[in-house]
């Protein structure tokens, strides 16, 4: 009997991927990085456990198809609600500008327009998997920069489909570019019409008949056959298999049975992701990177710099705080996993030379490996930004911003005019406590002006903005929003300008208490503890627990809170040498 080579290699990938995922999870590093390095170690350039390049390409293609299928299943236009402006317009501008820069660079180098388009497309896509893990691990998914990053990443993920169509169309040799693009678009329209027609008129009735069998295995196999069949049809039309897989997932996601299929397939996402990223590591040519390390090093630096600067300037143009723009630009500056899809599509279409392919693959590979180090630079970049005058004020507001607090003494600086800020402002008005509002959101500023409140357009984390708010004679500074990175910056600014003012900050998580007190906050309001107390009070009352016992449980929570505060204050005193 023949030795089961494919199964052996597949098993090697899964065993090592499982081990790597455990190790990287304990090290609090994205497992994606481990999968990439695993591919390098076990591939042709490493231990040689997997050396058949043809089979490696097949594994990469299978991983791509399955990955795109799960994305199609989970994709929804509803994900862009509330983020449509920055996701669609900001993400679209970023993509077009990146492609424009790529084409301009190609023209300077004497390359083809296709090479420039391809280069711009590859560098435009950031890593959804790595960025999301970073935001989730740090509890920053719901911050301003976290939401912006998610919106842009969703747009980029969806843009992969038309980019792959254009890549495939441009890359076909022997025909004019217009004819290639026209044929590719025609095939795509044909595929979409077929998918939409099948999804509306055939699929629901067919799935209803299958579901009547009440056999989960039959339903699952039927769905897989239809999905892979759609991917095969896409490949037969000369398009990418991944495009067909995406449309198949999207087709099922809009049926009554989409949730069932998501429940069956998405748990295997980690298998698909590990196969895909390990296969990319297998394709990475160590000797090529070594022989051309200077070129690749320059390309890595330029890609990170261009992505960072482009994203930062775009967000500032959309009137987001520069601090938010800097953080978002830094965490989205790498080349992402879907760039590898474009690389494979371009290679398969024959539109790029092997040297160009390897140079871009090496660049993408290294930018992902460098991503954790880029994330570590976020605090340092923000600290440097504090020293730039007017950095927290948009250029069109430099002359308009006046000292709204010039006639105030012993007043409160209220940072943020969201729901909590508005409630505090109303209480201050009723109690005749003078205050000034700091806000960056134009809608909230307009609302404050309607209420005839003193308001300054600016970032509370900037020293010049704080000076204009009268920090030198302020009674207190209250930060009514939760922003882990911005909070530390605000505390540093207040401590440097007026360490005697009473500083109140807000945080979502209990684990942030000690750090914020150590940095210099006088009072930290913790959402987790406040919610815990309210949950205990409400639920225990519902279960008819006596008020005395309820108070006992609440006191236990308050005691834990006080202990955390005492320990943090003690550490701060020791740090200050008191």
Image (cartoon, rainbow, N blue to C red):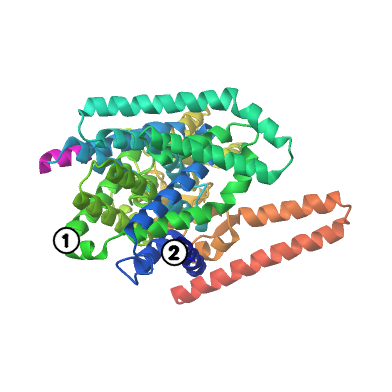
Q: Which residues are magenta?
A: 101-110
Sequence order check, earlier mark of 1 and 2: 2
Queried whether the magenta region covers residue 570, the answer comes back as: no
Task: Using a 10 Å C-alpha cutoff, classify the residue at mark 1 as few (fewer than 14 neighbours), some (14 to 19) or many (20 or more).
Answer: few
Q: Which residue is mark 1?
A: 294
Tell me how far mark 1 sits from mark 2, CA to CA. 38 Å
Query: Measuring 51% from the left and 58% from the top, which residue is drawn there?
Result: 137
Q: Secondary structure at mark 2?
A: helix
Residue 35 location, quadrant? bottom left
Question: Which of the numbered marks, if any, corresponds to residue 5?
Answer: 2
What percent of the width, then of the height, locates residue 547? 86, 56
Query: Measuring 61% from the left and 31% from the top, which residue is drawn there?
Result: 255
Q: Is residue 445 left or right of residue 96?
A: right
Taking the image as drawn, is residue 3 in sight? Answer: yes
Query: Measuring 78% from the left and 53% from the top, which residue is drawn there?
Result: 537
> How would you classify the magenta stretch by its main secondary structure?
helix
What percent of the width, then of the height, locates residue 76? 53, 35
């Amino acid at each position: 009997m023949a030795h089961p080579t494919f199964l052996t290699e597949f098993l090697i990938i899964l065993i090592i991927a499982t081990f790597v995922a455990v190790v990287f999870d304990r090290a609090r590093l994205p497992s994606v990085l481990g999968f990439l390095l695993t591919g390098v170690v076990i591939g042709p350039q490493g231990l040689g456990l997997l050396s058949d390049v043809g089979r490696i390409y097949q594994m990469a293609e299978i991983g791509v198809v399955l990955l795109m299928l799960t994305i199609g299943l989970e994709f929804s236009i509803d994900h862009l609600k509330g983020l449509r402006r920055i996701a669609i317009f900001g993400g679209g501008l970023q993509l077009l500008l990146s492609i424009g820069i790529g084409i301009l660079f190609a023209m300077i180098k004497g390359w083809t327009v296709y090479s420039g388009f391809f280069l711009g497309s590859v560098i435009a896509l950031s890593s959804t998997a790595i960025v999301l893990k970073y935001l989730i691990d740090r509890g920053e998914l719901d911050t301003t920069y976290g939401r912006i990053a998610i919106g842009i990443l969703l747009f980029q993920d969806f843009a992969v489909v038309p980019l792959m169509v254009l890549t495939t169309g441009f890359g076909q040799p022997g025909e004019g570019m217009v004819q290639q693009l026209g044929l590719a678009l025609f095939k795509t329209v044909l595929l979409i019409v077929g998918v939409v027609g099948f999804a509306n008129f055939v699929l629901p009735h067919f799935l209803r008949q299958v579901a009547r069998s009440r056999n989960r295995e039959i339903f699952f196999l039927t769905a897989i056959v239809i999905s892979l069949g759609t991917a095969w049809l896409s490949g037969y039309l000369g398009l990418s298999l991944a495009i067909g897989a995406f449309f198949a997932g999207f087709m099922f996601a809009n049926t009554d049975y989409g949730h069932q299929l998501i429940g069956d397939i998405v748990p295997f996402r980690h298998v698909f992701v590990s196969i895909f990223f390990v296969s990319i590591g297998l394709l990475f040519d160590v000797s090529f990177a070594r022989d051309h390390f200077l070129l690749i090093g320059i390309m890595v630096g330029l890609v990170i710099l261009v992505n960072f600067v482009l994203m930062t300037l775009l967000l500032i143009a959309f009137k987001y705080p520069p601090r938010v723009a800097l953080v978002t630009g830094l965490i989205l500056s790498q080349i992402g996993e879907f760039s590898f899809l474009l690389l494979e599509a371009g290679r398969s279409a024959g539109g790029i030379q092997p040297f160009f392919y390897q140079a871009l693959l090496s660049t993408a590979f290294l930018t992902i490996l460098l991503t954790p180090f880029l994330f570590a630079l976020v605090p340092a970049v923000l600290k440097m930004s504090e020293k730039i005058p007017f950095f927290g004020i948009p250029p069109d507001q430099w002359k308009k911003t006046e000292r709204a607090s010039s006639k105030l003494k012993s007043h409160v600086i209220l940072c943020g005019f969201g729901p909590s800020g508005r409630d505090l402002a109303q209480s201050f008005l009723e109690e005749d406590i003078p205050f000034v509002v700091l806000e960056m959101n134009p809608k909230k500023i307009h609302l404050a002006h309607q209420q005839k409140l003193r308001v300054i357009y600016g970032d509370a984390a900037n020293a010049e903005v704080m000076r204009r708010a009268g920090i030198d004679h302020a009674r207190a500074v209250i930060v009514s929003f939760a922003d882990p990175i911005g909070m530390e910056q605000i505390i540093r600014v207040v401590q440097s300008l007026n360490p005697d003012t009473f500083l109140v900050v807000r945080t979502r998580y209990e684990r942030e208490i000690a750090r914020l007190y150590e940095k210099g906050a006088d009072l930290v309001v913790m959402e987790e503890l406040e919610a815990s107390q309210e949950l205990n009070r409400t639920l225990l009352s519902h279960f008819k627990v006596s008020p005395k016992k309820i108070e006992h449980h609440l006191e236990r929570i308050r005691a834990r809170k006080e202990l955390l505060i005492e320990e943090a204050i003690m550490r701060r005193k020791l740090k200050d040498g008191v």
